[in-house]
Amino acid sequence: MPKVTIHQLEVRFQVDGDDGAVFTKLFNKHIQAWAKLYEDQCARARHTENERRFGDQEAL
């Protein structure tokens, strides 16, 4: 997965209560979901690479 650099991020929303806490809660929820998808994708790529190498190993 290519790296992404965010140079400027502006978020606007209206909430009842502490807007910083609401933003933090939403951000954490979505970044955790993204991280899980990314980790799953990396695990699949490692598994695929290991499967490809299986036939290349020397017999013991």
Image: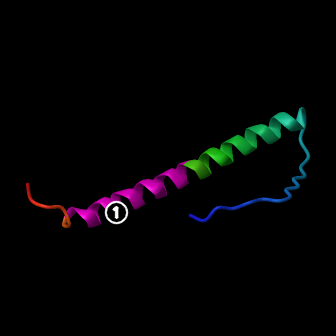
Does the magenta-highlighted stretch encompass residue 6? Answer: no
Q: Which residues are magenta?
A: 36-54
Q: Quadrant of residue 1?
A: bottom right
Is residue 34 toward the left or the right of residue 43 in the image?
right
The kind of secondary structure the magenta stretch mainly shows is helix
State whether residue 19 is above or below residue 42. Answer: above
Residue at horizontal 46 percent and vertical 56 percent from the top: 42
* Residue 6 on image: x %, y %: 78, 59
Element assignment for label 1: helix
* Residue 22 on image: x %, y %: 81, 38
Residue bearing the label numbered 1: 49
Does the magenta-highlighted stretch encompass residue 49? Answer: yes
Is residue 54 toward the left or the right of residue 50 in the image?
left
For badge 1, the amino acid type reads Glu
From the viewer's side, name the closer residue of 18 and 53. Answer: 53
Residue at horizontal 42 percent and vertical 53 percent from the top: 43
* Residue 28 on image: x %, y %: 69, 41
